[in-house]
Image (cartoon, grey):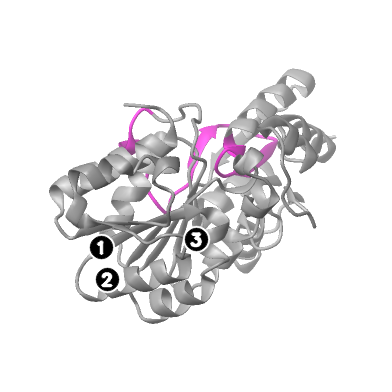
Amino acid sequence: MSSELRHIHAETLLELARDHENLRVLEADLMGSVSTGKFQAEFPDQFIQCGIAEANMIGVAAGLSATGKVPFVHSFGCFITRRCYDQLFLSGGYAQQHINIFGSDAGVAAVTNGGTHMPFEDVGLMRLIPDSVVIEVSDAAVLKKAMHYSYQNPGVNYIRSTRKDLPELYLSPDEIEIGKGKVLREGDDLTIIASGLSVHDALEAAAEVEALMGKTVTVVDMHTIKPVDTELVIRCVNKTGKLLTVENHNVTGGLGDAVIAELLEAGVAPTAFRKIGVREQFGQVGSLDYLKDQYGISAQAITEAAIAILD
């Protein structure tokens, strides 16, 4: 099996369809980007090519859901959220339909596709749909778990991911529970809560901080951004006091806002807190490393922020 997440996505759809005749896959002329051509070849009657008409695709998905089908729809993260938000909100959420959405090329993962294809607002939009579930993929196991969960969980489920490879964090999807964050590194002096590709940079930064300062850092993969694992967040902050959130997304409306809101509503306040993410910027063309630097979400930027909080 390929380790590229676009192939994991297609292979998981095939696994699900072999067990569930009611599954349907809808594409907006982007089969090649996520390898769903192989799904169309094996299940032509369960595949619909909707063309570059994302809002209509969501309407079709809502109609399929209303007749007992379970649709999975895909497009780049900006087009499958921002471009067709009213259809998602009304035909999906308001109408209580079951629509599973794969938003690929999230944030800086869009790289050379450029600014128009680079969503930094999709998590915020999808969090605002009542009863929605928002998941950000940090490795292949998380993607597989998220897709199996989405098939079983009625409602609007949004999975945000890169199309390309991410280093392995988990040996099996069985290690993942949607709605529960995962502690990947234990520490006493600072908690870093991250999601998606930023989890890997957070782990690198935690190791660097320990080497430079002798301070230990807890790192949490908060793959489920909605609902946030409030119990875990409180436990970590009560242990370390200081908190840093990291996301490949706008700091407004994303992971950091979700985490701090849950903490404050529970009456728990970190002794120091900072959000790392995109601030008042649009997307642009560039390599992944260049873009991480430009938007202040690189491992180096996380290390510097952690040192500033700890020092």
| Residue type indicated by callout 3 | Ile
Q: Nearer the viewer, residue 249 or 301?
A: 249
User: Where 38 sits versus 252, above or below?
Assistant: above
Spatial CA span between label 2 and label 3: 17 Å
Which residue is label 3 attached to?
80
The answer to whether residue 195 is magenta is: yes
State which quarter of the image contains the C terminus.
Answer: top right
| Range of magenta residues | 171-199
Query: Residue 294: x percent and y percent?
Result: 79, 40
Query: Residue 233: x percent and y percent?
Result: 57, 51
Query: Residue 240: x percent and y percent?
Result: 66, 41
Nearer the observer: mark 3 or 1; the answer is 3
Residue 65 is tagged as 2
* Mark toward the start of the polypeptide (3 vs 1): 1
Which SS class for mark 1? strand
Residue 102 in view of the camera? no
Spatial CA span between label 3 and label 1: 17 Å
Please tell me which residue is depicted at 81% across the width and 40% down the height of the picture: 309
Q: Quadrant of residue 12?
A: top left
* Mark toward the start of the polypeptide (1 vs 2): 2
Spatial CA span between label 1 and label 2: 6 Å
Residue 86 is tagged as none
Query: Residue 219: x percent and y percent?
Result: 59, 36
Which SS class for mark 2? helix
State which quarter of the image contains the N terminus.
Answer: top left
| Residue type indicated by callout 1 | Val
Residue found at the far top of this picture = 211
| Residue type indicated by callout 2 | Ser
Mark 1 touches mark 2? (CB < 8 Å): yes
Residue 9 in view of the camera? yes
Which residue is label 1 attached to?
70
The answer to whether residue 209 is magenta is: no
